[in-house]
């Protein structure tokens, strides 16, 4: 009858016992290694595999495996056996070289690395370069843009505008409107009819088009509700802006204060516009910093109407375009969805400060 391999009798030397106890107790030791050390220490006390398995709450084959391996190879037997498969060819040093070259250098006669040029530089394959870049989130082929405001009152204006978004006034007493104009909206007609969407094939259109004129969309987004007051004009002057202000004034109940978030466009600050506001004390103006139109929530709504209605539309005339815009606003106001502002003024200012620090530290 086969009873299996004989149970190894473990007798530890002083150095081995000290090392095993140290590994079993040390916090940085991996759990697997710590368990193996405890198995050996318990075995050295003369306990059976059954007793050790019960005490450590593990299986008997696990106890037998590490007891036998220590009996044959001593401390070296507690290490993991080499895994099967092809040995690793790309070393940590090679990976470090690729990452360092990508971040700190430029290829000769080019502005950014490609997998081909980096492979030639380092002697690795293009697939290897691609895997390393993907692992570390490196995308040399992409570039983003940024713009810093030079407004001397940038901090004050950010806190003022963001304060309206984060802590708006009571809706029964005041309304917050983000106002701006989307100018030069083109009425474009494609030279050929659109080819419709089909399974496995997107909608297609010709690259060329016919221009039928432009319009300017004046819009005021109500921050609390997402409703939009809109008006289209063929020109973009202070006269058209005043006409739009009159529409806002007629749309907002007389007893409510009106907080307007606007940019510093010249049309918003002409003498006639300033006179109009002075004669109506219920209006409170909040200007976004110079070159910081992204603080105005209506800009996000402009992106939405462009994506959903204007960019892929076909318009045979400016009148056709203006009708499509007003229909979109009417549909929006049937079920309005406000944008949720989550960034505090402190968070925005911290990001700007971090960007400025990066600029100061970057090589010229």
Image: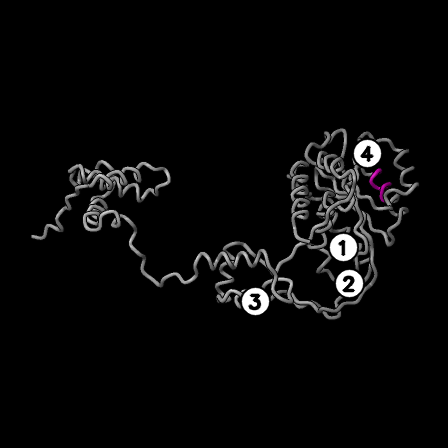
Say which of 360 and 131 sits in front: 360
Q: Position of residue 77 (x, y in %)?
A: 25, 50
Q: Is residue 249 magenta?
A: yes
**Mark 2 vs mark 4, CA separation in Å:** 38 Å
Q: Label 1: how many residues lie within 10 Å, few (<14), some (14-19) or many (20+)?
A: some
Q: Is residue 254 magenta?
A: no
Say which of 16 and 260 sits in front: 16
Q: Residue at x 74, y 39 (%)?
A: 222
**Quadrant in the picture for residue 187:** bottom right
**Mark 2 vs mark 3, CA separation in Å:** 42 Å
Q: Position of residue 24 (x, y in %)?
A: 30, 38
Q: Residue at x 70, y 60 (%)?
A: 312
**Which tag is nearer the camera, tag 1 or tag 3?**
3
**Visible in this render: residue 230?**
no
Q: Which numbered disc flags the more N-terminal residue, 2 or 4? A: 2
- Answer with left or right where residue 102 lies relative to residue 319: left
Secondary structure beneath label 1: helix
Q: Which residue is mark 1?
A: 324
Secondary structure beneath label 2: strand
Q: Which numbered disc flags the more N-terminal residue, 3 or 4? A: 3
Q: Which numbered disc flags the more N-terminal residue, 1 or 3? A: 3
**Which tag is nearer the camera, tag 3 or tag 4?**
3
Say which of 22 and 79 sits in front: 22
Q: Which residue is mark 2?
A: 188
């Amino acid at each position: 009858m086969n009873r299996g391999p004989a149970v190894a009798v473990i007798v530890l030397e002083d150095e081995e016992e000290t090392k095993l106890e140290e590994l079993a107790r040390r916090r940085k030791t991996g759990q697997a290694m710590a368990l193996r050390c405890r198995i050996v220490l318990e075995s050295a006390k003369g306990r059976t595999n059954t007793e050790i398995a019960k005490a450590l709450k593990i299986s008997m084959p696990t106890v037998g495996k590490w007891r036998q391996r220590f009996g044959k190879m001593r401390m070296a037997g507690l290490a993991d056996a080499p895994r099967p498969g092809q040995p690793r060819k790309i070393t940590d040093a090679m990976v470090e070289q690729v990452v360092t070259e990508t971040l700190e250098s430029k290829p000769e006669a080019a502005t950014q690395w490609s997998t081909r040029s980096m492979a030639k530089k380092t002697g690795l394959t293009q697939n290897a370069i691609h895997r390393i870049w993907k692992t570390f989130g490196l995308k040399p082929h992409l570039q983003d843009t940024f713009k810093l405001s030079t407004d001397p009152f940038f901090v004050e204006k950010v806190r003022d505008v963001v304060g309206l978004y984060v802590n708006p006034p009571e809706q029964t007493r005041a309304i917050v409107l983000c106002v701006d104009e989307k100018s030069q909206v083109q009425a474009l007609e494609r030279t050929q009819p659109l080819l419709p969407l089909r399974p496995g094939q997107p909608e297609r259109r010709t690259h060329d088009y016919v221009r039928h004129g432009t319009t300017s969309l004046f819009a005021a987004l109500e921050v609390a509700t997402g409703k939009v007051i809109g008006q289209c004009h063929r020109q973009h002057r202070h006269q058209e802006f005043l006409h739009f202000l009159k529409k806002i004034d007629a749309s907002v109940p007389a007893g409510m204060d009106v907080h307007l978030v606007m940019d510093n466009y010249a049309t918003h600050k002409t003498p006639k516009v300033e006179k109009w506001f002075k004669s109506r004390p219920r209006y409170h103006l909040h200007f976004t910093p110079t070159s910081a139109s992204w603080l105005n929530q209506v800009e996000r709504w402009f992106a939405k109407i462009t994506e959903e209605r204007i960019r892929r539309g076909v318009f045979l005339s400016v009148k056709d375009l203006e009708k499509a815009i007003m229909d979109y606003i009417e549909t929006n106001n049937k079920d309005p969805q406000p944008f949720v502002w989550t960034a505090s003024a402190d968070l925005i200012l911290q990001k700007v400060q971090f960007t400025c620090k990066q600029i100061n530290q970057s090589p010229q």
